[in-house]
Amino acid sequence: MNRRQFLTSGIAMICGATLPGRGALADGSCAPPQFVPPGFPSLCNAFANLKKIEVASQKLTEWCWAASISMIFADAGHPVSQDEIVKRGYGSIVNQPGGIGQILNALNTSWTDNNGVGFKSKTSALFCPDIGRMNLSNPDIISTLSSNQPMLYCNLTHAMVLFQVNYTPPSNVGAAVVVDPMPGMGVRQLTPMEMVPVPYGQMRMLARIEIA
């Protein structure tokens, strides 16, 4: 993930880049030329169409990580409860935040879902300076979302599900939309600082997840 590129994206948000309403553009599409003012770049949209899940709130105050992972698993057709994810991370049901270790362990292991069906999850691309992994680029994000795959996003203290970005070609991301599991939040746009990676901003982790 290119830090300069995301810093530029943050500035674009401050300067007024807006995200089209969900469904205004098809997955991975760009605005038709007749709707782009002369001298302005084309605005494109990439989003994972979350057909299989509803917006889920975290059950306990520290369970944003479990709620976000649960939503991503459910979207892939494998419902797993927040309780089970927490139990896997801590050995028991506790109201504890998920550290990088708990989150990555949950995303890189085998599971049996609520219907008794087994599946495997792994992070195929990851931005996570905490462990020195930064093999995720803006084109990766656009490609992943356009393929109907939501991503796990973490700021400094909170986990969410990234499902939509807008961008100007080829890959200058200007805005991003998440499902925030904090009760009362739901779908929201990331703030400019949440778009900027640490240590200059608040983006601590972003993961592309493969489920099979």
Image (cartoon, rainbow, N blue to C red):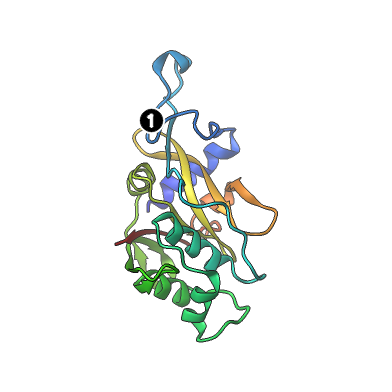
In this rendering, the answer to whether 175 lies above or below 43 is below
Q: Is residue 71 left or right of residue 143?
A: right
Return the x and y of residue 31 as percentages of the image width and height.
43, 23
The quarter in which the C terminus is drawn is bottom left
Q: Is residue 204 left or right of residue 125?
A: right
In this rendering, the answer to whether 78 lies above or below 53 is below
* Residue under the point 56% across and 33% down: 18
Dividing the picture into quadrants, the one containing residue 42 is top left
Q: Is residue 209 left or right of residue 197?
A: left
* Residue under the point 58% across and 82% down: 93
* Residue under the point 58% across and 46% down: 192
In this rendering, the answer to whether 81 lies above or below 184 is below
* Camera-nearest residue between 210 and 154: 210
Q: Residue furthest right?
A: 184
Label 1 Cα neighbours within 10 Å, binned few <14 / some 14-19 / many ≥20:
some
* Camera-nearest residue between 80 and 173: 80
Q: Residue furthest front?
A: 115
Return the x and y of residue 173 as percentages of the image width and height.
44, 41
Residue bearing the label numbered 1: 29
Return the x and y of residue 135 as percentages of the image width and height.
32, 59
* Amino acid type, mark 1: Ser
Whether residue 163 is visible, yes or no, is yes
Return the x and y of residue 131 as percentages of the image width and height.
39, 72
Whether residue 204 is visible, yes or no, is no
* Camera-nearest residue between 165 and 17: 165
In this rendering, the answer to whether 2 lies above or below 11 is below
Mark 1 element type: loop
Q: How many marks?
A: 1
Dividing the picture into quadrants, the one containing residue 130 is bottom left
